[in-house]
Image (cartoon, rainbow, N blue to C red):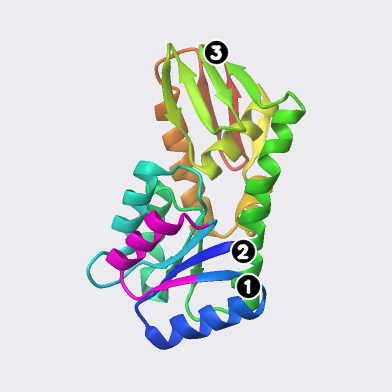
Amino acid sequence: MSKVLLIEDEWQLGQIVKDSLEMRGFEMLYAADGKEGLRLYEEHKPDVVVLDIMMPNMDGFTVTTEIRRQDKTTPIIFLTAKSQTTDVVKGFELGGNDYLKKPFSMDELIVRIKALLQRFKETPAASDAGADVIQIGQYMFNYTKQTLTRNNNTEFLSHREAEILRRLSENLNQVMERKTVLLDLWGDDSFFNARSMDVFITKLRRYLKDDPRVQIVNIRGVGYKLIF
């Protein structure tokens, strides 16, 4: 049974989501503010976190930052009001994995949760196949552990960063089409999701900057190419 931590200050919405997910077989933890949510996270270590951005005591961005200081892999889904969607780019930069705009359907939330859980559960299989470590110039990229290592310095990647870098590596010196990745990882190729993908590309370039031979090149209107 997967354990879901819901952090939502709208009590009525929180109860509806909690009850609905429990009816579908999830083990639920619920907090009505960010500070209590972080406490529950640290105590129970859930399989996925669903949280609002704007909350009392501690907002969703701060909660995400605190979680990512100790945990780089647990999936995080943001819940946002329509007026807050531009803030989700910041959420992705801090380590978020997905988002839903309010109002949302329970079926959509459940699909998003299951998709993230499945991706993370599938990761160990790559290790068994012996295909989880890829050399990129001076770097060793471990897809299973979501790490990028150079000279004993290790960068821990978010799930989406690791997924994008894996696709770039598999298409070395070839174009990785933006639309394909957006549909695969985000579910649609909207302008907003394209912007969030650009954020991840920028972060990957920063991680790889110490080897000047390694470059992620923008192919205008098509996608990106990893070269070295």
Which sits earlier in the primary sequence, circle 3 or circle 2? 2
Residue 30 vertical position relative to residue 35 in the rendered view, above or below: below
Give the magenta range.
29-46
**Residue 211 position within the rendered picture, expressed as x and y whole percent measured from the top left:** 44, 14
Taking the image as drawn, is residue 120 in sight?
yes
Residue 37, quarter of picture:
bottom left
Residue at 39 percent across and 28 percent down: it is: 206
Residue 108: assigned label: 1
Which residue is more in the foreground, 52 or 70? 70
Q: In the structure shown, which secondary structural element does the residue marked by tag 3 occupy?
A: loop
Quote the CA–CA distance across marks 2 and 1: 6 Å
Q: Please identify the residue farthest to the left as the structure is shown.
A: 57
Label 3 vs label 2: CA separation? 35 Å
Label 2 sits on residue: 112
Label 1 crowding class (10 Å Cα cut-off): few <14, some 14-19, many 20+?
Answer: few
Q: Is residue 217 above or below residue 67?
A: above
Callout 2 crowding tier (Cα within 10 Å): few <14, some 14–19, many ≥20: some
Q: Which residue is mark 3?
A: 137
Residue 190: x and y in percent read 57, 60
Badge 1 element: helix
Bin the neighbour count of mark 3 within 10 Å (Cα to Cα): few under 14, some 14-19, many 20 and up.
Answer: some
Badge 2 marks a residue whose secondary structure is helix
> Is residue 48 a member of the stretch shown in magenta?
no
Do tag 2 and tag 1 residues touch (Cβ < 8 Å)? yes
